[in-house]
Amino acid sequence: MQTQDLETPADLRCIETALSRAQAELPALGPLLTAFGPLLAERARLRQAAPGWTGPKLVIDPERYSQGAFVLAQTEFGGGFEDMSAHLQKAAKTLLPVMARSFPAIAAELAALGAAIADGTLAPQALAAAGFGEGLASSDDMPVPGVSEQTLNFAASELVRPFVERQAQDLAALVEALPWRQAHCPVCGGAPNMSVLRRTAVDNEFIQANGGRRFLRCSCCATQWTYKRVSCPACGCEEPDELINLRDPARVHERADACQRCKAFVLCLNSVELAEVPDLDVAALTMLPLEIQAKKQGYAPLAEHPWSSL
């Protein structure tokens, strides 16, 4: 397997450049880009400063791994990322105000959530649990009055994401030299919500003609890994007649790869002919029209993007 490092916001300029270009090319998406741009940038700063994997060194069983047991499935403590709840209160101080400016419709809820986090009404452990999608038993269980479950889950998932992605960078390095042929993430087992074709000089089963190597990108931890180019990640279909590409003729590098057999799709950026690969979160934002088109035609995403629920 070959994994691809996260597009380290190591270069925030990468995000800013991609946003600027997208704003100029797609004015109709201006409100969406304006809303999510500052959030992506602040999330990148948090990820850059976040601790990586600090627990015991993991020993990967190559045989189990080759059979589909992702890295966190081989840990001794339940198969999850390390607890990052101790860092969430500090992260909330910077991220929630950015989110409130970006999403004024829920600004009051985010302010109430921030206050509850600051004074301890909402325990960091409960916030982390919400960030990992551990739902509440009922609406009566909402820990912060006036904050909807949707807003809590959205904000919590954005708070834990930088820490998850930073840990994933360290964990992906443990298995970079090992073969991985699965459609789920080799680090956390998450489903992909995007793919990208990259220029490569290596010739193997993952490449067809001169089209580059296909990477899937995890919706949970942003790890990227190689996968067969002509294959549906949802059902494994490899029949060309069953696999279609939805495109906008005006944006030839973007498409939605859809499967007529299982009705699943995943967004794809073909970066082979691009001078530089844009930030992939921004690239996914620009493909929202394709995402909507695919859903209207009856296809379902393997995994949603953060903005899909909004």
Image (cartoon, rainbow, N blue to C red):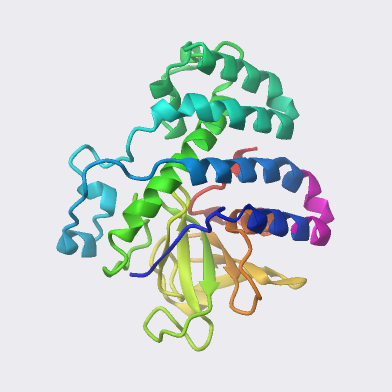
User: Can you say which quadrant of the picture contains the N terminus?
Assistant: bottom left
Q: Report whether 246 appears left or right of 216.
A: right
User: Which residue lies at the image location 73% right of the left edge and 48% below the top edge?
Assistant: 33
Q: Nearer the viewer, residue 178 or 293?
A: 178
Q: Main secondary structure of the magenta part?
A: helix
Q: Report whether 110 appears left or right of 261.
A: right
User: Can you say which quadrant of the picture contains the C terminus?
Assistant: top right
Question: Is residue 27 part of the magenta span, yes or no?
Answer: yes
Q: Is residue 73 above or below residue 96?
A: below
Question: Is residue 199 part of the magenta span, yes or no?
Answer: no
Q: Is residue 273 above or below residue 51?
A: below
Kindly tell me whether residue 23 is visible in this rendering: yes
Q: Is residue 22 above or below residue 221?
A: below
Kindly tell me whether residue 289 is visible in this rendering: no
Q: Quadrant of residue 10?
A: bottom right
Q: Report whether 299 appears left or right of 17.
A: left
Image coords of residue 297 (percent x, y):
64, 58
Image coords of residue 124 (percent x, y):
42, 22
Looking at the rendering, the stretch of residues picked out in magenta corresponds to 22-31
User: Which residue lies at the image location 24% right of the left edge and 55% below the top edge?
Assistant: 69
Q: Quadrant of residue 42?
A: top right
Image coords of residue 140 (percent x, y):
49, 11
Q: Is residue 120 above or below residue 284?
A: above
